[in-house]
């Protein structure tokens, strides 16, 4: 089968952007990126809640916060450790729900801005379905002044739900 492919986020949008014509084969494992194009907004606080059909997908969230950790934790230019995180809570990664809260102190270039991958998680397609959905219900970004920024959530790119196929197709 062909790999599941994704597009970049469009300006002012956040979500999951499947490439047109992409599809998953049963048994295939792939990584789902949650992307956003925040424009000039600077954010360090994110809330995500998404739902999926647990009969069609199994999910693994062990690396879901890595993208954020790579911005807000690590070593500075003097090779000193830093950790700006205030809250890092994976609330759910089972029974059809993935949800987390992440908050960090914004510091100079240590912010979410422009085009970013907010999170990514591993998924395996379990069985055939022509319209399998992984759907974001809540994706909120708060700017450095604490104001919530509304972004249009895009759950499907230009395609609609992700079709799951047998390998022969």
Image: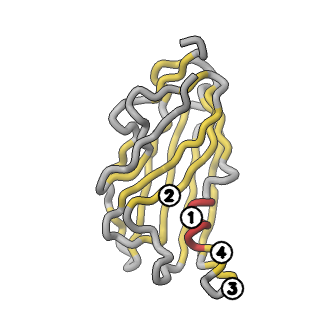
- Give the CA distance from mark 1 to mark 2: 6 Å
Tag nearer the camera, 4 or 1:
4
Q: Is residue 99 above or below residue 41?
A: above
Q: Secondary structure at mark 3?
A: loop
Report the disc number at residue 118. Answer: 2
Check whether the beta carbons of the residues at disc 1 and disc 2 lie within 8 A of each other.
Answer: yes
Mark positioned earlier in the residue sequence (3 or 2): 3
- Disc with the residue nearer the chain's start (4 vs 3): 4
User: In terms of sequence position, does the residue under pointer 2 or pointer 4 come before the other?
Assistant: 4
Q: Nearer the viewer, mark 2 or mark 4?
A: 4
State the mark number for residue 7: none
Task: Give the answer, above or below, for where 21 lies relative to 9.
Answer: above
In-front residue for pair 87/63: 63
Neighbor class of circle 4 (other Cα within 10 Å; few <14, some 14-19, many 20+) is: few
Q: Earlier in the sequence, mark 4 or mark 1?
A: 1
Q: Which residue is situated farthest in the bottom direction here?
A: 78
**Residues at badges 2 and 4 in contact (C-beta under 8 Å)?**
no
Q: Quadrant of residue 37?
A: bottom left
Disc 3 to disc 2, C-alpha distance = 24 Å
Residue 51 percent location from the top left of the image:
52, 40
Residue located at (48% from left, 79% from top): 106
* Residue identified by numbered label 3: 80
SS class, disc 2? strand
Q: Pinpoint residue 162: horizontal percent, then vertical percent.
A: 47, 29
Question: Label 2 crowding class (10 Å Cα cut-off): few <14, some 14-19, many 20+?
Answer: many
Residue on which the image places disc 4? 74
Query: Which mark is nearer the camera, 1 or 3?
Result: 3
Distance CA(mark 2)–CA(mark 4) = 17 Å
Helix, strand or loop at disc 4? Answer: strand
């Amino acid at each position: 089968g062909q790999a599941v492919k994704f597009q970049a986020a469009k300006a002012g949008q956040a979500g999951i952007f499947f490439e047109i014509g992409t599809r998953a084969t049963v048994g295939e494992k792939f990584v789902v990126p949650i992307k956003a194009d925040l424009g000039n907004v600077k954010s360090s606080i994110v809330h995500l809640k998404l739902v999926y059909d647990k009969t069609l997908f199994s999910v693994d969230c062990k690396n879901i916060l890595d993208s954020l950790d790579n911005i807000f934790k690590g070593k500075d230019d003097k090779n000193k450790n830093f950790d700006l995180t205030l809250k890092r809570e994976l609330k759910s990664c089972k029974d059809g729900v993935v949800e987390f809260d992440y908050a960090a102190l914004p510091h100079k270039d240590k912010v979410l801005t422009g085009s970013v991958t907010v999170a990514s998680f591993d998924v395996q397609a379990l069985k055939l379905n022509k319209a399998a959905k992984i759907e974001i219900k809540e994706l909120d970004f708060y700017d450095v002044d604490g104001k919530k920024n509304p972004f249009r959530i895009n759950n499907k790119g230009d395609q609609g739900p992700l079709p799951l196929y047998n390998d022969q197709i």
